[in-house]
Structure formats: structure tokens, C-alpha cells
Amino acid sequence: MASTRHRGVKFLRLSGGRVVVRWRDPVSGKQVQRDCEPLGLTNDDLRRRWAIDKAAELRKLRGQLELGSGSALRIDIEQSHRDYLASFVNANTLNSKRAALADLAAHLAGQGARNVQDIAPAMLAAWGNHVRRPANPHVIGTRCLYLAGAGAWLRWARGLGQLPRCTPENIKAALRRQKAPSEPIEVLRPQQVRDVLRSCIAHDAAEHEKVAPLALLLLLTGMRYSEGAELVWNEVDLEAKVIRLPAGRVKTATARTVTLAECPAVLELLGALRLRGGGDGRVFRIKRAVAEKLRLRTMGDYKAPQWDWRTLRRTCGSVIACAGVLGPGSVFLAAKRAGHSVAVAEKHYLGALTDLPRDAKNIEQALGIEAEAKAIVKGMATRPSGRAVIAS
């Protein structure tokens, strides 16, 4: 068995012809051994250059540990993932992050990394290339979500001193996102909005469970589904004509205020719902699975065009921006209503609507849904004879 030494990195050719590389981990003090073939080190020149880079990495890591910026504690990758995910409550956010982190953990395990401290820039670069590969069955948007989700965890771990081998530059370079085709932002045209609301009204007239009030609220406020469905009365100020969402209820963890002066039908709807009473403080009493069932039923049984909760949110912002309902600052205020910067709102939420009246005073007028809104409010204005399923 022959050996080659270079600045603390040793290459060994084992009796079976397999070449391995060894070094001592500055964090744990233990010897680490890796096969050269999976690392792409197939000849002496590649091994020499890799050894130089590795030796520089080890020197830097030892310096960080001497300065106290590295963590001597070995943290299991999956445990670090659990700790990171514990800070999120939104189910959709958790599911998207779990998928990305599980794929990353499996790939790192295949390269011999069990602890966060084992992760090296080359490993992240290999995973990034794996995600971006043309044969990946996921669409580009999903691939970018994987890369973004993994990057967020890596930056979090580095902030805790768990990732001493990787710099922000390493993470950014390894997890660069792919350029996705830019499709038009999907919003509902005024006639489509009218058809959706009419189908919801027809549904509610025939069924015990109601979907129209929640759909109207989300359409006119631009709130996320969870923000509207879980709305409580102490967040509603009818006198001031605002809904104040606390940071703990907002996906971005940033409190925001949704004004209601530009959607008077919401004020009437909330006033009607308030008169219906209820003891648990919630405006609506409906589970996501039930709401989805009702939404699908409006399309299947009541001939509504294709719609979902997010499309209602996008339509609201697009109407405010394109109809100028809030004056010269409509684009900025539409972005703030959605809880995003103007750049993010223009990229993901604000679609082009060119057939809106320029003299509309509110969102209902801009969409031409005043009659439909009035019918939904009227349906909530009388106290129900039995238990209310959607309104508390």
C-alpha cells in the first residue's frame, strides 16, 4: 500500500486498487476517510489540486475554531432539519421545505455526511447540479423551491455555527437557481369573477355549507386563505374600516393592515356575520378540507370557471393596481395589501387587466360584481334557523 502526503491530506492506494483520501477533522478530532472515485479524483493531477483546496479548507476551519466561531458539537443533519422546521407553522411552507431538505439529506448521506459539520462546498455543489439536471422530473419552479429551501436552512445552520466549512458565497454558488420560463400571472377577468360568485351563490342556496362569504372576503381583501378562514373578531375593526393581521398569523411573520374602505361589501358582510353571533371569537368556522370540497363543487356541480383561493388573492391586487382604485399609489398599496414588496408583487401577484373602468370608486365597481356582492351579504343578513356551518 503506497501513500502520498500533502499538507495534512493523505492519499492511500489500498491492496484492491481502491484509492482513498484521509484527513483529520478539526471539529471532532477524528480521522475521516473517503473514496476518491465518488469525489471525481481519478488521477494524480486531480488529487493534487483537490488536496491543495482541502488543506486550505482545513486551515480555515482550524482558524475559525481557534477564534470560537465554529461549533465543537456534532449536530445530526436530520436533527438540525427538525430544529429548523420547528420555527414554521404554515403547512404549505413546511411541506415544501421538508421535501427539499429530505432530498438534500439523502444526497449528503450518499457522500458520507452524517453531521452538519461534515458538509463541504463540493457536496452542496454536487447536490445543486443534481437538482438542476435536465433529467430531473420536477419542473423548474419546483427545482428552484428545492434550492431556495435548502439554502435557507444552510444559512440558518451557519448562523448557529453548525456549518463551519461553507461560506455564504459557497452556498450561493452551489444553489444558484435555474431561470424559469415567465408565464403570465393567472387572474380572473371581470366576467369570470361574476361567474364564480354566481356559482357560489347557487351552491349556497342549495347546500347547507356555505362558501360564498369566504370567497367574497378573500376576493375583496386579497388575504391568504389561512388569514381569511382563521380570521377572529379582535382582528376586525369595523369602525376604523380595517383588518389588522398580527405577525403570528402572517406567512411572512410581518404584521399588516388590510384597509376596507375600498371594498364596502366586506364591511357589510362582516357586519352581517357579526350579528349572527358565535362564542369562539372566529368569523368563520370551516376546515381547509371542507372549503376545498365546496370550492371543487362550485366548479363541478355549479359550472364555475376554474378558480382557487390564490387566484382570488391575485385578482384583488391586480384590480387595485390596474383600475387605480387607490389613486396614484395603487401599485404600491396593492403590494402592501398582499404583504410583499412591489418587486415581489409584480413578479408573482399583479396580472394585467385592461378591461376595467377607470372611474371605479371601489373593487366591486371595478369588477362589476355589486349585485353578486349584495346577494351574498343578504344571504348572511338573517340569523340562521340551525347551526351555522361557516359563520360563527
Image: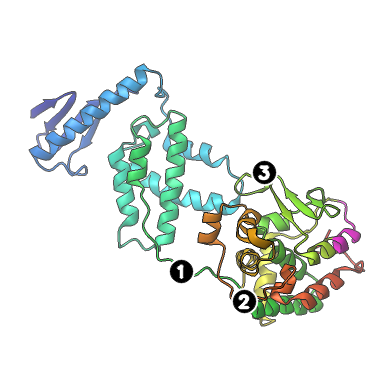
Q: Position of residue 156 (x, y in %)?
A: 47, 36
- Name the kind of residue labelled 1 in the image: Glu
Can residue 272 be found in the magenta stretch?
yes
Seen at 55% across and 68% down, the residue is 351
Q: Image height check: is 32 above or below 291?
A: above
List the residue tagged with mark 2.
Answer: 189
For label 2, the crowd category at 10 Å Cα-Cα, with few meaning under 14, some 14 to 19 and many 20 or more, is some
Of pointers 1 and 2, the one earlier in the residue sequence: 1
Q: Which mark is residue 311?
A: none
The percent position of residue 223, horizontal first and vertical second, equals 67, 58
Q: Cβ–Cβ below 8 Å for labels 3 and 1? A: no
How many tags in the picture? 3
Residue bearing mark 3 = 247
Q: Which residue reaches farthest front?
A: 328
For marks 3 and 1, give the CA distance: 31 Å
339 and 361: which is toward the camera: 361
Which is more N-terminal, label 2 or label 3? Answer: 2
- The answer to whether residue 168 is left or right of residue 346 is left
User: Between 207 and 1, which is closer to the camera in this rendering?
Assistant: 207
Stretch of the chain drawn in magenta: 271-279
Q: Residues within 10 Å of mark 3 (few under 14, many from 20)?
A: few
